[in-house]
Image: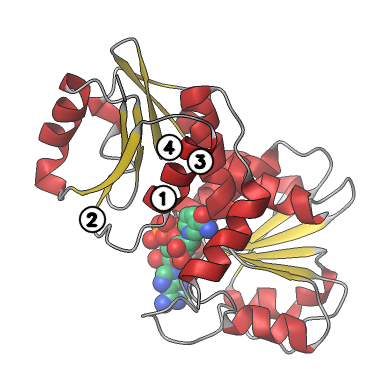
Amino acid sequence: MPKLYGVIGDPIDHSLSPVMHQKWLRENGYDDHYHAFRVTKDQLEDAVRGLRALGAGGFNVTIPHKTAIIPLLDDIDEEAEVIGAVNTVINENGRLVGTNTDAIGFMKSLEEKGFAPEAGDSVLVIGAGGAARAVCAALAKRAKIRVDLTNRTPEAAERLSARFFNSNESAVWTLEEAEKRLAQYRLIINATPVGMSGFADALPVRTERLTAHTICVDLIYRPLKTRFLEAAEQIGAPALNGLPMLIHQGAAAFQRWLGIWPDTFNMEKYLLENYFQ
Ligand code: NAP
Protein backbone atom coordinates (compact mmCIF):
# COMPACT_ATOMS: atom_id res chain seq x y z
CA MET A 1 0.00 0.00 0.00
CA PRO A 2 1.40 3.47 -0.89
CA LYS A 3 2.65 5.38 2.13
CA LEU A 4 2.10 9.00 3.13
CA TYR A 5 4.94 11.50 3.58
CA GLY A 6 4.68 15.25 4.00
CA VAL A 7 5.77 18.53 5.46
CA ILE A 8 3.98 20.44 8.24
CA GLY A 9 4.42 24.16 8.80
CA ASP A 10 2.76 27.56 8.63
CA PRO A 11 3.12 29.21 6.15
CA ILE A 12 3.66 26.27 3.80
CA ASP A 13 2.22 27.38 0.42
CA HIS A 14 5.59 28.10 -1.20
CA SER A 15 7.44 25.03 0.09
CA LEU A 16 9.43 23.24 -2.61
CA SER A 17 9.53 20.02 -0.56
CA PRO A 18 6.40 18.44 -2.17
CA VAL A 19 7.76 19.00 -5.69
CA MET A 20 11.17 17.66 -4.73
CA HIS A 21 10.08 14.56 -2.79
CA GLN A 22 7.26 13.62 -5.16
CA LYS A 23 9.76 13.68 -8.05
CA TRP A 24 12.31 11.60 -6.12
CA LEU A 25 9.61 9.09 -5.07
CA ARG A 26 8.61 8.53 -8.71
CA GLU A 27 12.22 8.42 -9.96
CA ASN A 28 12.95 5.69 -7.43
CA GLY A 29 9.88 3.62 -8.28
CA TYR A 30 7.70 4.46 -5.26
CA ASP A 31 3.99 5.24 -5.64
CA ASP A 32 3.92 6.87 -2.19
CA HIS A 33 2.61 10.43 -1.75
CA TYR A 34 4.21 13.55 -0.27
CA HIS A 35 1.92 16.43 0.69
CA ALA A 36 2.29 19.88 2.26
CA PHE A 37 0.02 20.39 5.26
CA ARG A 38 -0.63 23.82 6.76
CA VAL A 39 -0.56 23.21 10.50
CA THR A 40 -0.92 26.15 12.89
CA LYS A 41 0.75 26.17 16.32
CA ASP A 42 -2.41 25.13 18.14
CA GLN A 43 -2.99 22.26 15.68
CA LEU A 44 0.49 20.76 16.05
CA GLU A 45 -0.37 18.13 18.66
CA ASP A 46 -3.44 16.93 16.71
CA ALA A 47 -1.47 16.88 13.46
CA VAL A 48 1.29 14.69 14.93
CA ARG A 49 -1.31 12.35 16.44
CA GLY A 50 -3.04 12.18 13.04
CA LEU A 51 0.15 11.43 11.11
CA ARG A 52 0.99 8.73 13.65
CA ALA A 53 -2.51 7.17 13.37
CA LEU A 54 -2.34 7.23 9.56
CA GLY A 55 0.99 5.42 9.63
CA ALA A 56 2.86 8.14 7.71
CA GLY A 57 6.30 6.89 6.66
CA GLY A 58 7.81 10.16 7.82
CA PHE A 59 7.45 13.89 7.50
CA ASN A 60 9.38 17.14 7.43
CA VAL A 61 8.84 19.89 9.95
CA THR A 62 9.31 23.57 9.27
CA ILE A 63 8.60 27.02 10.75
CA PRO A 64 7.22 27.40 13.42
CA HIS A 65 7.29 23.80 14.73
CA LYS A 66 10.95 22.73 14.64
CA THR A 67 11.40 23.00 18.42
CA ALA A 68 7.80 22.68 19.63
CA ILE A 69 7.50 19.21 18.07
CA ILE A 70 10.24 17.66 20.21
CA PRO A 71 8.10 16.71 23.25
CA LEU A 72 5.46 15.21 20.93
CA LEU A 73 7.89 12.64 19.50
CA ASP A 74 8.97 9.30 21.00
CA ASP A 75 12.65 10.12 20.61
CA ILE A 76 15.12 12.44 18.89
CA ASP A 77 18.58 11.47 17.65
CA GLU A 78 21.90 13.09 18.52
CA GLU A 79 21.87 15.44 15.52
CA ALA A 80 18.48 16.91 16.54
CA GLU A 81 19.63 17.05 20.16
CA VAL A 82 22.79 18.98 19.29
CA ILE A 83 20.97 21.43 17.00
CA GLY A 84 18.01 21.68 19.37
CA ALA A 85 15.49 21.37 16.54
CA VAL A 86 13.84 18.71 14.36
CA ASN A 87 13.27 19.10 10.61
CA THR A 88 12.60 15.44 9.78
CA VAL A 89 10.58 12.73 11.52
CA ILE A 90 11.01 9.04 10.76
CA ASN A 91 8.31 6.50 11.58
CA GLU A 92 10.24 3.49 12.92
CA ASN A 93 7.53 0.83 13.29
CA GLY A 94 5.16 3.21 15.03
CA ARG A 95 7.83 5.16 16.95
CA LEU A 96 8.24 8.72 15.75
CA VAL A 97 11.92 9.68 15.84
CA GLY A 98 13.08 13.23 15.14
CA THR A 99 16.31 14.13 13.40
CA ASN A 100 17.77 17.22 11.76
CA THR A 101 19.21 17.15 8.23
CA ASP A 102 20.01 20.89 7.91
CA ALA A 103 23.63 20.50 9.06
CA ILE A 104 24.36 17.64 6.65
CA GLY A 105 22.49 19.50 3.89
CA PHE A 106 24.60 22.60 4.48
CA MET A 107 27.94 20.75 4.48
CA LYS A 108 27.06 18.64 1.43
CA SER A 109 26.15 21.79 -0.50
CA LEU A 110 29.62 23.18 0.27
CA GLU A 111 31.44 19.91 -0.48
CA GLU A 112 29.71 19.56 -3.83
CA LYS A 113 31.15 22.92 -4.96
CA GLY A 114 34.58 22.36 -3.37
CA PHE A 115 33.82 25.11 -0.81
CA ALA A 116 34.06 23.09 2.44
CA PRO A 117 36.55 24.63 4.90
CA GLU A 118 39.82 22.81 5.47
CA ALA A 119 42.30 22.70 8.35
CA GLY A 120 43.66 26.20 9.02
CA ASP A 121 40.67 28.03 7.46
CA SER A 122 38.76 30.78 9.26
CA VAL A 123 34.99 31.02 8.87
CA LEU A 124 32.54 33.81 9.79
CA VAL A 125 28.89 32.94 10.48
CA ILE A 126 26.42 35.85 10.42
CA GLY A 127 23.33 35.12 12.53
CA ALA A 128 22.54 33.10 15.63
CA GLY A 129 19.11 31.59 14.96
CA GLY A 130 18.06 28.07 13.97
CA ALA A 131 19.88 28.03 10.63
CA ALA A 132 23.10 29.35 12.23
CA ARG A 133 22.84 26.56 14.82
CA ALA A 134 22.74 23.93 12.07
CA VAL A 135 25.67 25.63 10.29
CA CYS A 136 27.70 25.66 13.53
CA ALA A 137 26.84 21.99 14.20
CA ALA A 138 28.21 21.12 10.74
CA LEU A 139 31.33 23.30 11.11
CA ALA A 140 32.06 21.93 14.61
CA LYS A 141 32.63 18.50 13.04
CA ARG A 142 35.51 19.78 10.90
CA ALA A 143 38.93 19.60 12.45
CA LYS A 144 41.21 22.57 12.97
CA ILE A 145 39.09 25.37 11.59
CA ARG A 146 38.30 28.65 13.32
CA VAL A 147 34.64 29.74 13.44
CA ASP A 148 33.80 33.32 14.45
CA LEU A 149 30.26 34.58 14.85
CA THR A 150 28.49 37.90 14.46
CA ASN A 151 24.87 38.79 15.04
CA ARG A 152 22.56 41.77 15.49
CA THR A 153 22.13 40.59 19.08
CA PRO A 154 25.69 39.60 20.13
CA GLU A 155 24.44 37.77 23.27
CA ALA A 156 22.72 35.18 21.08
CA ALA A 157 25.97 34.67 19.16
CA GLU A 158 27.86 34.31 22.48
CA ARG A 159 25.51 31.51 23.53
CA LEU A 160 25.84 29.78 20.16
CA SER A 161 29.62 30.05 20.17
CA ALA A 162 29.82 28.62 23.71
CA ARG A 163 27.59 25.69 22.70
CA PHE A 164 29.77 24.54 19.80
CA PHE A 165 33.31 25.93 20.10
CA ASN A 166 36.12 26.55 22.58
CA SER A 167 36.77 30.21 23.26
CA ASN A 168 40.27 29.89 21.75
CA GLU A 169 38.81 28.75 18.41
CA SER A 170 35.88 31.18 18.17
CA ALA A 171 35.39 34.91 18.67
CA VAL A 172 32.11 36.81 18.72
CA TRP A 173 32.09 40.20 16.99
CA THR A 174 29.54 42.98 16.76
CA LEU A 175 28.46 43.53 13.14
CA GLU A 176 30.73 46.59 12.93
CA GLU A 177 33.74 44.65 14.28
CA ALA A 178 33.10 41.82 11.83
CA GLU A 179 32.82 44.24 8.88
CA LYS A 180 36.38 45.43 9.53
CA ARG A 181 37.70 41.85 9.48
CA LEU A 182 35.96 40.39 6.41
CA ALA A 183 39.20 39.99 4.46
CA GLN A 184 40.61 37.50 6.99
CA TYR A 185 37.96 34.84 6.29
CA ARG A 186 38.11 31.97 3.79
CA LEU A 187 34.35 31.51 4.08
CA ILE A 188 31.50 33.82 5.16
CA ILE A 189 27.99 32.46 5.65
CA ASN A 190 24.87 34.60 5.90
CA ALA A 191 22.45 32.68 8.13
CA THR A 192 20.05 35.61 8.67
CA PRO A 193 16.95 36.40 6.59
CA VAL A 194 18.44 39.79 5.63
CA GLY A 195 18.22 39.93 1.84
CA MET A 196 15.30 37.49 1.56
CA SER A 197 12.25 38.31 -0.63
CA GLY A 198 9.72 40.14 1.51
CA PHE A 199 12.50 41.36 3.82
CA ALA A 200 14.35 44.63 3.40
CA ASP A 201 16.61 44.32 0.33
CA ALA A 202 19.69 44.84 2.47
CA LEU A 203 23.12 43.49 3.28
CA PRO A 204 23.68 41.40 6.44
CA VAL A 205 27.05 43.18 6.82
CA ARG A 206 28.62 46.05 4.88
CA THR A 207 30.88 44.50 2.25
CA GLU A 208 33.48 47.22 1.52
CA ARG A 209 36.26 45.08 3.03
CA LEU A 210 35.28 41.87 1.24
CA THR A 211 38.03 40.43 -0.98
CA ALA A 212 37.99 37.99 -3.89
CA HIS A 213 39.58 35.11 -1.95
CA THR A 214 36.56 34.76 0.40
CA ILE A 215 33.84 32.25 -0.49
CA CYS A 216 30.45 33.87 0.22
CA VAL A 217 27.49 31.64 1.08
CA ASP A 218 23.92 32.81 1.64
CA LEU A 219 21.38 30.34 3.02
CA ILE A 220 18.63 32.34 1.33
CA TYR A 221 17.34 30.94 -1.99
CA ARG A 222 14.57 33.48 -2.72
CA PRO A 223 15.98 35.47 -4.40
CA LEU A 224 18.74 33.24 -5.75
CA LYS A 225 21.07 36.22 -5.81
CA THR A 226 20.86 38.34 -2.67
CA ARG A 227 22.64 41.67 -2.38
CA PHE A 228 25.33 39.88 -0.37
CA LEU A 229 25.99 37.41 -3.22
CA GLU A 230 25.78 40.23 -5.76
CA ALA A 231 28.49 42.11 -3.84
CA ALA A 232 30.62 38.93 -3.81
CA GLU A 233 30.24 38.43 -7.55
CA GLN A 234 31.09 42.05 -8.28
CA ILE A 235 34.52 41.64 -6.73
CA GLY A 236 35.07 38.17 -8.20
CA ALA A 237 34.55 36.17 -4.98
CA PRO A 238 32.95 32.70 -5.28
CA ALA A 239 29.26 32.75 -4.27
CA LEU A 240 26.74 30.07 -3.32
CA ASN A 241 23.02 30.48 -2.59
CA GLY A 242 20.81 28.36 -0.29
CA LEU A 243 19.15 26.20 -2.97
CA PRO A 244 21.74 23.38 -2.87
CA MET A 245 21.39 23.25 0.94
CA LEU A 246 17.61 23.00 0.62
CA ILE A 247 17.97 20.14 -1.87
CA HIS A 248 20.57 18.28 0.19
CA GLN A 249 18.64 18.54 3.47
CA GLY A 250 15.70 17.06 1.56
CA ALA A 251 17.89 14.33 0.09
CA ALA A 252 19.18 13.43 3.56
CA ALA A 253 15.56 13.16 4.82
CA PHE A 254 14.67 10.95 1.82
CA GLN A 255 17.63 8.73 2.63
CA ARG A 256 16.54 8.40 6.27
CA TRP A 257 13.05 7.32 5.18
CA LEU A 258 13.86 5.05 2.25
CA GLY A 259 17.57 4.24 2.41
CA ILE A 260 18.32 5.87 -0.96
CA TRP A 261 20.33 9.04 -1.67
CA PRO A 262 18.28 10.62 -4.50
CA ASP A 263 19.50 12.56 -7.55
CA THR A 264 20.40 16.03 -6.25
CA PHE A 265 22.27 17.22 -9.36
CA ASN A 266 19.31 17.07 -11.74
CA MET A 267 16.96 18.30 -8.98
CA GLU A 268 18.81 21.62 -8.86
CA LYS A 269 18.46 22.01 -12.63
CA TYR A 270 14.78 21.01 -12.48
CA LEU A 271 13.92 23.47 -9.70
CA LEU A 272 15.86 26.30 -11.35
CA GLU A 273 14.10 25.77 -14.67
CA ASN A 274 10.59 25.37 -13.26
CA TYR A 275 10.36 27.36 -10.03
CA PHE A 276 12.82 30.27 -10.30
CA GLN A 277 11.88 31.92 -13.60
P1 NAP B 1 15.73 32.62 12.91
O1 NAP B 1 15.87 31.44 13.80
O2 NAP B 1 14.54 33.50 13.06
O3 NAP B 1 17.09 33.52 13.12
C1 NAP B 1 17.22 34.71 12.46
C2 NAP B 1 18.62 35.29 12.69
O4 NAP B 1 18.76 36.41 11.83
C3 NAP B 1 18.88 35.79 14.10
O5 NAP B 1 20.26 35.68 14.36
C4 NAP B 1 18.47 37.26 14.00
O6 NAP B 1 19.18 38.10 14.89
C5 NAP B 1 18.91 37.60 12.61
N1 NAP B 1 18.06 38.65 12.04
C6 NAP B 1 16.74 38.58 11.79
N2 NAP B 1 16.31 39.73 11.26
C7 NAP B 1 17.38 40.56 11.20
C8 NAP B 1 17.57 41.90 10.75
N3 NAP B 1 16.56 42.61 10.27
N4 NAP B 1 18.82 42.42 10.81
C9 NAP B 1 19.85 41.69 11.31
N5 NAP B 1 19.72 40.42 11.75
C10 NAP B 1 18.51 39.86 11.69
O7 NAP B 1 15.76 32.22 11.39
P2 NAP B 1 16.47 30.93 10.76
O8 NAP B 1 15.52 29.78 10.80
O9 NAP B 1 17.79 30.80 11.38
O10 NAP B 1 16.60 31.33 9.21
C11 NAP B 1 17.56 32.26 8.76
C12 NAP B 1 17.60 32.26 7.24
O11 NAP B 1 18.12 31.02 6.78
C13 NAP B 1 16.23 32.43 6.57
O12 NAP B 1 16.40 33.29 5.44
C14 NAP B 1 15.90 31.04 6.10
O13 NAP B 1 15.07 31.04 4.94
C15 NAP B 1 17.28 30.50 5.76
N6 NAP B 1 17.35 29.02 5.80
C16 NAP B 1 17.66 28.37 4.65
C17 NAP B 1 17.76 26.99 4.65
C18 NAP B 1 18.12 26.28 3.36
O14 NAP B 1 17.89 25.06 3.29
N7 NAP B 1 18.69 26.96 2.40
C19 NAP B 1 17.52 26.26 5.82
C20 NAP B 1 17.19 26.96 7.00
C21 NAP B 1 17.09 28.36 6.96
P3 NAP B 1 18.69 38.37 16.40
O15 NAP B 1 19.32 37.28 17.23
O16 NAP B 1 19.21 39.72 16.69
O17 NAP B 1 17.18 38.31 16.39
Q: Earlier in the sequence, mark 1 or mark 2?
A: 2
Asked if labels 1 and 3 touch by Cβ distance under 8 angstroms, the answer is no
Looking at numbered disc 3 in the image, what kind of residue is underneath it? Trp
Q: Earlier in the sequence, mark 1 or mark 4?
A: 1
The span from disc 1 to disc 4 (Cα, nearest Å) is 22 Å
Mark 2 sits on what residue?
10
**Residue 191's image quarter?**
bottom right
Q: Earlier in the sequence, mark 4 or mark 3?
A: 3
In the rendered image, the vertical position of residue 151 relative to residue 199, given as above or below: above
Residue 9 screen position, x and y as percent: 26, 50
Mark 1 sits on what residue?
17
Looking at numbered disc 2 in the image, what kind of residue is underneath it? Asp
Closer mark to the observer between disc 2 and disc 3:
3
Mark 3 sits on what residue?
24
Residue sitting at x 73%, y 81%: 232
The residue tagged with tag 1: helix, strand or loop? helix
In the rendered image, the vertical position of residue 220 relative to residue 6, given as above or below: below
Disc 2 residue crowd, few under 14, some 14–19, many 20+, Cα 10 Å: some
Mark 4 sits on what residue?
84
Closer mark to the observer between disc 3 and disc 1:
3
Quadrant assignment for ligand 1: bottom left
Residue sitting at x 63%, y 47%: 264
The residue tagged with tag 2: helix, strand or loop? loop
